[in-house]
Image (spheres, rainbow, N blue to C red):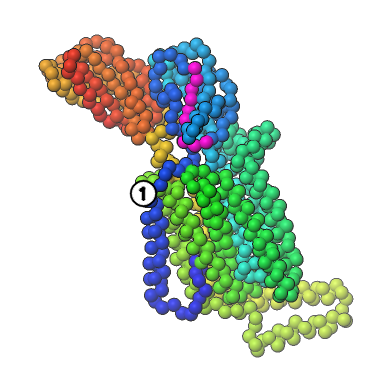
Amino acid sequence: MSATAPYAGPSPIRRPVAAAALLAALVSLVFGLLLAGAGPASAHAALTGSDPQDGAVVDTAPKEVTLSFSEAIAVGDDSIRVLDPSGKRADTEAEPRDLSEGGTVRYGVALHSGLPDGTYTVAWQAISADSHPISGAFTFSIGAPSETTVALSSQEAGGGPVGVVYDIARYAAYGGFVLLVGGSAFVLICWRGGASALPMQRLVVRGWLTLTAATLVMLLLRNPYTGSGKFADAFDLAGLQSVLDTKPGAALVSRLLLLGAAALFIAVLFGTYARREDEQERKDLTFGIAVGGGVVAAGIAATWAMSEHASTGIQASIAMPVDVAHLLAVAAWLGGLASLLVALYRTPDIGSAAVRRFSAVAFSSVVVLAATGIYQSWRQVGSWSALTGTRYGQLLIIKVALIGVLLAVAWFSRRWTGRLTDTAVAPSGGKKKAAEENTAPDEASDDVAPERAAQLARQRAVLTATKKKRIRDADPERSGLRRSVLAEAAVAVVLLAVTTMLTSTEPGRTEEEAAGGATAASAPAAGGPVNLSMPFDTGGRNGKGTVRIDLDPGRTGSNDLHVWIDGSDGEPMDVPELKLALTLESKDIGPLPVVPNRLAEGHWTASGVQIPMAGDWKIDVTVRTSDIDQVTIDKNAKIG
């Protein structure tokens, strides 16, 4: 019932068809706008370049290594490490220098002087502007490639047990926010009598406790989550201080302060407001606490908007308020849905008017969600390829599908809402009898002790509640509504989980843009020897032949290369010049030059050929058979 307007009578048969058509049009509009072009957007930062470049072989040792990123990052003392072939630090271990200028983000670390020849590994880790940790590694060689003993952890930044707990706390924080804000809004807008209902009070208070506890856990784990990955560092005071100096740390502290104000709001809502019996006084108080509560809720939502995806990239000044509106709409819809579920199952007093008011609130929330969601999707995805080919886009498709399921179930809830009647009060024939039963003990209250009178009052309250529950449970319309709302709530839980995953996933637009320049850390992958045979014809006399290539072991890391050239008669053939280059076009890596040495007639070899990452590599071979006759041929090979 979440996306429905108040029921206005029996629906004709054509209404389900119209609703389905409207939903299909909405989904088409969402995905259609995803294709609209825009300027570059950033969310997770990505490595866009380095000096020396990945896989480069330099003649002399550089004085420093510099890395360029797609957006601003936060770095620490060990954010960039350069390791020699034996695994020892080759940099001066000082904090990276900020070399940024204009729109270019660049950091550098100085190297020790007199570094020997060999292959060096650059490992980096930083904090993206949207609060997520990022990391990677690449290699370059001085003089000539060599064997290296460096073994980097295959654990992704922000992963491991600490990452799991942090992600759970992130999900719990969103869940607590939904219950706190949505439950409070449900009481103020839909069912003011719910302020006196103990189940409703428990729901909102538990939402506050969950959000507060999750925020504290995230604040303590922020240092190990973005750094060492060890739980013990959660109580490192120096690390905690460094977290407080960052944008995500400041957002978490601000959230805790706002939760203090939210505690005061809860006390007023379920205290002073619940005790007001005069309707005019309650109405006046409703406006005041609604304004105050709205400000606090918007402030809490802003702690997410100002520290995550919305705070960076294109149109950040628009994206942040849009994100706040999106979060508040989610809370009003899903939190109100949870409140309605509790009210239907745990309280006998909620009437049809409150259910219809929530139907209107939910419909308005879905409209806001559609508008803000379309904008956010366009901003973070931007193309069909990013929608279907990235994890963010695939999660977005799942989210839209879940919303469609939720709206379909809501249509059934709408039908039950239209049939719902207030059955909490006994029929007129039983009202007098119930009144007599309830007042009879009072007439004799003067004849019993106060303790006994209190006991009788409690018994009467339990008896009344039991009767109301029995009447409520016997109402088929109310039972049908409870079942459909329960189904909505189950889908909503999954939807909230997917939404949480989206907040910690690199947006599709950024992933596609970074694919050409980002260098990801990758452990050596298992592979097999690469064997290629490539015919050539330089066009001159004796210019035809075949190049045979063996690359062993054919995986990331160091490889041995053997090249044989056979003439048109099948015999070994010597040529004046032979050159190779390897290019990974999907990652914009290369060409990495390889100049093999002649080993014997028609046989060339090169050792320590470095393959920085697995992929579909293009191997270019240049063969010169005379001063003027030369040809370059190429072939692709899966390596790693």
Q: What is the residue that sits farthest to the bottom in this orientation?
A: 429
Which residue shows up at 53% across the image and 23% down it? 109
Residue 505 in picture, x, y percent from top left = 48, 44
The residue lying toward the viewer, choosing from 619 and 36, is 36
Residue 280 lies, with reference to residue 180, above or below; the image says below
Residue 438 lies, with reference to residue 562, above or below; the image says below
The residue lying toward the viewer, choosing from 634 and 423, is 634
Kindly identify the amino acid type of the residue bearing the numbered disc 1: Trp
Residue 354 in picture, x, y percent from top left = 60, 72
Instruction: Find disc 1 in the rendering and name its residue.
Output: 384
Rendering quarter of residue 489: bottom right
Q: Rate crowding at label 1 as few (under 14), some (14 to 19) or many (20 or more) other CA atoms within 10 Å.
A: some
- Residue range of the region highlighted in magenta in the rendering: 63-72
Which residue shows up at 49% across the image and 13% down it? 115
Residue 246 in picture, x, y percent from top left = 61, 38
SS at badge 1: helix
Q: What is the residue that sits farthest to the front in this orientation?
A: 102
Rendering quarter of residue 250: top right
Residue 329 lies, with reference to residue 17, above or below; the image says above
Which residue shows up at 53% across the image and 63% down it? 365
The residue lying toward the viewer, choosing from 610 and 254, is 254
User: What is the magenta segment's predominant secondary structure?
Assistant: strand
Residue 441 in picture, x, y percent from top left = 80, 82
Residue 587 visible? The answer is: yes
